[in-house]
Image (cartoon, rainbow, N blue to C red):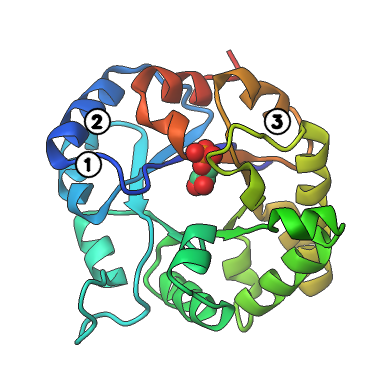
């Protein structure tokens, strides 16, 4: 039985002062303990997340990391730094990192290997562009991404991975993929994991949908067999919405 997992991706939002308020509000919420909840904050907010979320069942993590532990990599954050502050998650291969910052599958694969080496839970993002969707190439695109990103990832690690299927055209646009379309792609990804690894690995891996998830549509998405959670941008920035997302079963 896979535990549902709802993670907020704050992206480049929340100054430390704003983060303090949001985290304090989140701490007051009574969240369904049968759902795993987490927030991936800007790096500068991580220490405050560690302090305020201590003793709650809300985990936290980074939105990106370098694969090396330290060195001359100006502007980067390392897996060791994430671990040291108490982070459990790290988002890797988000489409904004791929498209705006030019991250390719080889780099994402190195980061993924490093995240597992450092006992972090990676949330690996994949998904197609609008052009690819219109050309019906979404499966081809996601398959190519995952095959490259998962190179040399072991069977035991894949079972700990969270994969976030995020069609780029649905991110921050208010256009959610229909629950059926999202389910079809999550099922495709699960079958791909079965092909690349095993049926057991496919049963264990958790697959999130991401792209304009909000309180109004989370229940329908989460009711689908192959959707185990959501990676949420905009709606994770309000404590009430985040609570509603996590408590969707109620
Ligand atoms: O990582 C989260 C996704 O990019 C979705 O963002 P969104 O919920 O604002 O559409």
Question: Which quadrant, please, contains the C terminus?
Answer: top right
Look at mark 1 in the image and give the residue it sits on. Answer: 49
Would you place residue 210 above or below residue 164 in this image? above
* Numbered label attached to residue 23: 2
Which is nearer the eye, 102 or 182?
A: 102
Label 3 C-beta lies within 8 Å of the nearest ligand 1 atom: no
Residue at the extreme top of the image, as rendered: 250
- Residue 139 picture location, percent across and down: 82, 61
Label 1 C-beta lies within 8 Å of the nearest ligand 1 atom: no
Which quadrant holds residue 201?
Answer: bottom right
16 left or right, relative to 176: left
**Badge 3 element:** helix
Question: Which quadrant, please, contains the N terminus?
Answer: top right
Would you place residue 80 above or below residue 131 in this image? below
Q: Residue at x 75, y 49 (%)?
A: 186
117 left or right, relative to 22: right
Q: What is the CA distance from the residue labelled 1 to the residue labelled 3? A: 28 Å
Look at mark 3 in the image and give the residue it sits on. Answer: 221
Which mark sits nearer the N-terminus, 3 or 2?
A: 2
Which quadrant holds residue 238?
Answer: top left
**Badge 2 element:** helix
Say whether marks 2 and 1 touch (CB < 8 Å). yes
Is any part of residue 187 visible from this angle?
yes
**Badge 1 element:** helix
Q: Residue at x 57, y 68 (%)?
A: 157
Which mark sits nearer the N-terminus, 1 or 3?
A: 1
């Amino acid at each position: 039985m896979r535990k549902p997992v709802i993670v907020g991706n704050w992206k480049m939002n929340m100054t430390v002062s704003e983060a303090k308020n949001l985290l304090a509000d989140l701490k007051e919420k009574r969240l369904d303990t049968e759902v795993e909840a987490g927030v991936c904050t800007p790096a500068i907010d991580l220490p405050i997340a560690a302090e305020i979320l201590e003793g709650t069942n809300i985990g936290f993590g980074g939105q990106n990391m370098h694969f090396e532990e330290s060195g001359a990599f100006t502007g980067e954050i390392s897996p060791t730094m994430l671990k040291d502050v108490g982070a459990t998650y790290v988002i890797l291969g988000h489409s904004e990192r791929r498209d705006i910052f030019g991250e390719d599958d080889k780099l994402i694969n190195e980061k993924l290997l490093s995240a597992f080496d450092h006992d972090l839970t990676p949330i690996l993002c994949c998904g197609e562009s609008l052009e690819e969707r219109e050309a019906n190439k979404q499966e081809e695109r996601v398959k190519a991404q995952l095959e490259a990103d998962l190179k040399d990832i072991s069977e035991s690690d894949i079972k700990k991975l969270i994969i976030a299927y995020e069609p780029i055209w649905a991110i921050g646009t208010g256009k959610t993929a229909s629950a059926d379309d999202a389910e079809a792609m999550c099922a495709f990804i699960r079958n791909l994991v079965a092909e690349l690894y095993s049926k057991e690995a496919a049963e264990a891996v958790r697959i999130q949908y991401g792209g304009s998830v909000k309180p109004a549509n989370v229940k329908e998405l989460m009711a689908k067999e192959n959707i185990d959670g959501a990676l949420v941008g905009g709606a994770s920035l309000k404590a009430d919405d985040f609570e509603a997302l996590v408590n969707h079963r109620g």
